[in-house]
Amino acid sequence: MTAIVVRPERARQADRRQESIALSHVRLMMVLLLFVAAIGAISIRILCLWAFNRPSAAYDPSDALLPARGEIVDRNGVVMASTINAWSIGIHADRLLNPPEVLARQFARLMPEHSYEQYLKVLKSGRRFVYLRRRALPELVQQINAIGEPAIDYQREPERLYPQASLASHVLGWTDIDGKGASGMERVLQSRLIDPAQRGAPVTLSIDTRVQAAMESELSAAMAKFSAIGAAGVVLDVRTSEVLALTSLPSFNPNAPGHIPMPEPGQVTVRFNRATEGVYELGSTFKPFTVGMAMDSGIVTSFGQMYDCPKALHAGRFTITDTHPFGRRCSVAEIMKESSNIGTAQIAEQVGAQRQRAFLQRLGFLDRVQVELAERGRTLTPGNNWGQIATMTVGYGHGIAVTPLHLATGYATLFNGGIWRPATLFKIGPGHPLPAGHRVFTEQTSLKMRPLLRLVVLKGTGKKADAPGFRIGGKTGTAEKILNGRYTHGAVVTSFAGVFPMDDPRYVVIAMLDEPKATKDTYGFHTAGWNVAPVIQGVVRRIGPLLGVVPDESREVDLSQVLPYVREEGH
């Protein structure tokens, strides 16, 4: 009989423990193998990425730290445009937890650019994603976040910031909602500002924000005082044609280009650049060019040269008159001093249409003004009707329409020794050399014209432009506007073209008012000598010391070439 051996319970437990340990070892080994396989796969992937997607030698990790768009600074390094990180607010309308009616009411209160109905329509659309606000301020983001709707989405995106607000807005322009340059220098510099190789260094403009602020301030005050519908101003370096200030009023805030009001009926939008885009008949500011042409052509040999200046000059079926008629023979010096249309028309007639056109062509007046901006107006000229009458009227600034910047480069040419250069909005220096130029007037004519225009400010129509010690010279201009195909005395464009200091010209200052009104202070006159000449005085007083021109009342232009030919008594 076989005996049955019964294993003790302790032995059976020991066997089960051994089996469990063995199974755990197997499982651990499998986990380890899987872990090693994963590590291997990741390593192989990294090696593949390294081998086949290595960055080029030109790659710089610091590029990731650069702003999305480079800075624009003025000639002194003052930031005019920069890029910061902003917020955008969007919503996933297909994931709403709160009732659309409640959200729409809150959105309309916090973001009133859209109505409750518009927000409700968006929220009920079921769309996967819709922007509610781009370039949102942190305060707004915080308020929207407090609503507590999980479907609201917040994203960071670059925002273009203009620290100087509306200052030089027509020069800078603005960027669209996607950050692309839409106008002004932002548009011109689009490729340069987003180039990773260059956007770390700012672009330096020729603009001086101090000079720009002075021009805008003085023009704004005059525009308000005389109820003008617009204004423009330019400050230009005589020798380099660098634009230190370029103003068009009304201006706008490029930080909020979408909130620009609609223009009044018959008026242009505030985005319109009156200094480079608007073309105007600038009246008697053209007269110095006519005299300069005549001197270079050998027609005028002395400022004492005499012309018949009757109270009215009949030319064909037209009659030319003067605001201050002589009714006698008058000298070239007197013609300029009293801004005689009759005298200037006769000088222009002697110059002739062919020579007049050639001079104006070399001055750039027959083409769009040369400057970097895309916003440039097309000049208006007599065209094929450039005969005797047109020559006479163009001689005193009628029948030809140019921009204020045209006028600035013309005066720079006339007083810098006779060399024309295109205007530039870049600071002259490395990367931006002095623009090439060409001769228009002889150096002798340029020198002789200085006392003639100083005479206009000291004793003529430009007296209110004089600023003691700065030796300003210049010329007033008042031109009737064409309304319904006819010139009207009630609507005029007044302008003043000034140069200082006239004994050693350094800067041109142009100011223009569009449709200024007469006031009690001007005794019912709305001409340039009363309303825009004082702007020149105010601007020069403010910017002269900033530009290194210190007022010196002990110095004066030599007037011996003009004073002997001017009668002091009335006429």
Image (cartoon, rainbow, N blue to C red):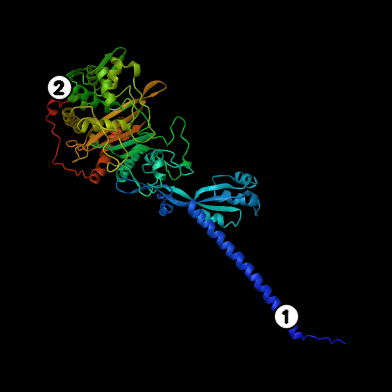
Q: Which mark is residue 15?
A: 1
- 168 vs 362: above or below: below
Q: CA gap, disc 2 to disc 1?
A: 130 Å
* The quarter of the displayed image where residue 222 is located: top left
Q: Is residue 376 visible in this depiction of the protein?
A: yes
| Residue occupying the point 13% across, 28% down | 561
Measuring from the top left, give residue 272's x and y in whole percent: 41, 34
Tell me what residue is drawn at x 56 percent, y 56 percent.
145
Q: Which residue is mark 2?
A: 301
- The image quadrant that residue 27 belongs to is bottom right
**Residue 513's spot in the image, x, y percent?**
34, 33
- Going from N to C along the chain, the mark reached first, 2 or 1, is 1
The three-letter code of the residue at mark 1 reads Asp
Instruction: Give the SS element for disc 1.
Output: helix
The residue most toward the right is 1
Amino acid, disc 2: Thr
The answer to which of 232 and 330 lies nearer the viewer is 232
Q: Is residue 176 left or right of residue 97?
A: left
Q: Residue at coordinates 37% horizontally, 44% vertically from top-left? A: 167
Q: Rate crowding at label 2 as few (under 14), some (14 to 19) or many (20 or more) other CA atoms within 10 Å.
A: few
Q: From this viewpoint, which residue is outermost toward the front?
A: 1
Q: Residue furthest top?
A: 316
